[in-house]
Amino acid sequence: MNPRIDIYVDRIKHNTRLLVEKAKTCNINLAVVTKSFCAMSEIVETLIDTEIKYLADSRIENLKKMQHFKLEKMLLRLPMISQVNEIVQFADISLNSEIVTIRELNKAAIEQKRTHKIIIMQDVGDLREGIFNDEEMISVVREASELSNIKVVGVGTNLSCFGGVIPDKENLGELVETAKKVESILGYPLEIISGGNSSSLYLIDEFKMPKKINNLRIGEGIVLGGETTCGLQIEGAYIDTFVLTAEIIEIKQKPSVPIGKIGLDAFGNVPSFKEKGNLIRAILAVGKQDFGAYDIFPIDTEIKVLGSSSDHLIIDITSCEEPYKIGDEISFTLGYGSLLALMTSEYIYKNIVCE
Ligand SMILES: *Cc1c(COP(=O)(O)O)cnc(C)c1O
């Protein structure tokens, strides 16, 4: 079936085990982030016996899909007030920065006779979500701790997502200081001090992880065996966990530069081309509607990606040894952006491979 993603679940599981063990050396537990694969059950079920502590996703629809798994579920994206009922029902824990939202979560929790756990987010510089100043942090913690059906169980931060800020001893050190203050207000130790995402993993290798950090929320490290911001390649991890395969529908020798007056392409950009003489060009039946405008990497390294439109991917096979023909399949490893898009595309067949 084409186009498809072959999902090597055993490799994903291997990566998860590897990172669980790595994190353990710093007394850190993991929340496995399932959003990049839309919390697909066949993948999640292979991961639950790997000593991971939480299942985490940014979308409540995905947490709902994972209800039959016993592990505690964590909502990563700040709650929408319009969804507080579902959030209290399907998420055990949510990440929060707005007291007005926490009050609404409390009301929903009272109605459902549940206790909803919250992690309060601090922004230590990346400028996406989180409380930015100390006074607000203290007042939010004070008020939240007095709400009958809310339990403050942790503090956390997120880095390298919007601002590209790299986690280090200093900014995670700030989170640790906040954790201490919060604990003194609450009068009990926090269960979760969550020091970020896959971009924080390198601190373990370099023995720079502040001691009090006891949780990381890991997606990319598990699914792709690396991390983009810091260019981390995790030793011993697989990168070919999700492999895109698409079929060749045309092969022709054509020039490298289009003929005629050049306007805008289908996406409003002015295309530019280098003169490289005639090329053997192949067209694959997959396109931007499936992988967005994100990078994909041919496994046959002689192949060059020339570009794509909504439904077509154009590659240069001039220097390939393999005698490709119409109907052949070409495979690619993925970056985080293309993985997200492909797993979300309904035109891509999702094929679980057990090795
Ligand atoms: C997506 C997300 C993560 C996981 O990030 P990775 O870089 O894939 O490890 C962690 N925390 C939050 C809040 C997220 O939205």
Image: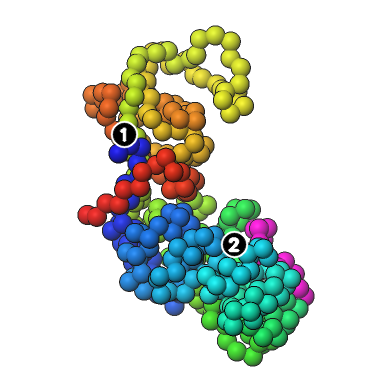
Which label's residue is closer to the chain start, 2 or 1?
2
Which numbered disc covers residue 330? 1
Type of amino acid under label 2: Arg
Q: Is residue 97 left or right of residue 159?
A: right
Q: Nearer the viewer, mark 2 or mark 1?
A: 2
Residue 233 magenta-drawn?
no
Type of amino acid under label 1: Ile
Say which of 304 and 53 sits in front.
Answer: 53
- What segment is highlighted magenta in the picture? 123-137
Quadrant in which the C terminus appears: bottom left
Displayed quadrant of residue 325: top left
Say which of 52 and 221 sits in front.
Answer: 52
Vertical relation: 261 (above or below) 142:
above
Q: Position of residue 302 (x, y in %)?
A: 32, 30
Q: Is residue 24 left or right of residue 107?
A: left
* SS assignment for the magenta stretch, majority: loop
Label 2 to label 1: alpha-carbon separation: 36 Å
Say which of 328 and 208 sits in front.
Answer: 328
